[in-house]
Amino acid sequence: MDPATSPDAPPGLSRDLEGVLSGADAVVVFAGHKEYRGLEPARVKELCGCTWPVIVDGRNVVDPDAWIAEGFAYRGIGRGDKNGHALKE
């Protein structure tokens, strides 16, 4: 999902956050858009629908502790291991 995507974006790109998160196992953030900073971990986990979702924060825009507390495995570029536990299978 990219909020900067134009309405005539090519197939595979979407502005529908809930649609792209539905059933996802992982969330990957590679842009610093304000929409990503405001993501609520509980809502994202609900949309993903899996027990141990993963978030990869390539721009350091989310609060690792909030996502880990919600049950996400967190990976951030340049932040080291913030999880304090092994990744779940």
Image (cartoon, grey):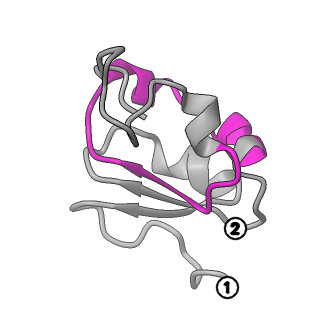
- Name the residue rendered at 32%, 18% in the picture: 8
Q: Magenta residues?
A: 22-46
- Report which residue position mark 2 lands on: 52
Name which residue type carries label 1: Glu
Q: Position of residue 15 (x, y in %)?
A: 45, 24
- Name the residue rendered at 58%, 81% in the picture: 87
Please state if 29 lies on the left or on the right of 69 as rendered.
Answer: left
Q: Nearer the viewer, residue 51 or 6?
A: 6
Residue 12 in magenta? no
Whether residue 21 appears in this view of the structure is yes
Residue 29 in magenta? yes
Q: Reading the chain from its start, which is encountered first: label 1 or label 2?
A: 2
Q: Nearer the viewer, residue 29 or 1?
A: 1
Q: Quadrant of residue 81?
A: bottom left
Q: Position of residue 54 (x, y in %)?
A: 55, 63
Please state if 5 lies on the left or on the right of 21 as rendered.
Answer: left
- Report which residue position mark 1 lands on: 89
Q: Quadrant of residue 7?
A: top left
